[in-house]
Amino acid sequence: MFKDKNIAVIVCLAYVTASYRMVNIYIRGAVGEYSAMTFLPLLALAVYRIFTTDSSDWKHYKKNILPLTVGMSGLSGTHIFSGEMVIAVLLLLCMVLWKKTLRKNTLRVYITAAMQTVLSNLYFIVPFLDYTLLPLL
């Protein structure tokens, strides 16, 4: 993304040693939150590649499905609130970049990744919905 390895290393070190991350790990012990932070760079890469690569070559473009699916699956399995925030930011980004979002292959990538994420996380989604919707019945 940065086209310079040195900048990538500096940004990586800054992300890994960020004070908020260290407080989550060593003081608060917020396992879900700092585990979810592991998947955020993968999601950033996936979204960056979706909006910057050529969408007309489906064989190459469909490689964006896997990082988006793994990142969203990781978020949903570790920290639901982080997942909700990422979905909100992703929806906002899609609205801002609506011309790039409404391309045929971009929509295919998002829909396929969403379906794969839901299917791969049914082990968590079904009991979660059962637990949260039970009081409503």
Image: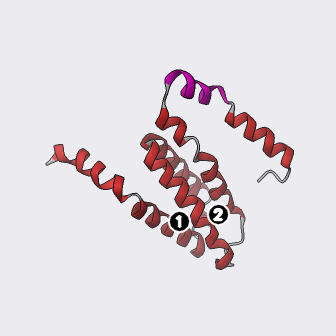
Residue located 60% across and 30% down the image: 21
Which color scheme did the rendering employ for the protein?
A: secondary structure
Q: In the rendered view, does 8 fall on the left or right side of 23?
A: right
- Of the residues shown, which amino acid type is indicated by label 1? Tyr
**Residue 22 point in image, percent of width and height:** 61, 27
Residue located 74% across and 36% down the image: 13
Give the residue at mark 2.
50
Q: Are marks 1 and 2 in contact (CB under 8 Å)?
A: yes
Q: In the rendered view, does 133 fall on the left or right side of 26?
A: left
- Of the residues shown, which amino acid type is indicated by label 2? Ile
Placement of 118 over or under 90, stated as above or below: below
Estimate how packed mark 1 is, as few (under 14), some (14 to 19) or many (20 or more) residues with alpha carbons within 10 Å: some
Mark 1 / mark 2, whichever is N-terminal: 2
- Considering every residue shown, the one lying at the far left of the view is 137
Q: Which secondary structure type mostly characterizes the magenta part of the structure?
A: helix
Q: In the rendered view, does 99 fall on the left or right side of 88?
A: right
Q: Quadrant of the N terminus?
A: bottom right
Placement of 86 over or under 26, stated as above or below: below
Give the residue at mark 1.
110
**Where are the magenta residues, as a range?**
18-28
Placement of 126 over or under 85, stated as above or below: below
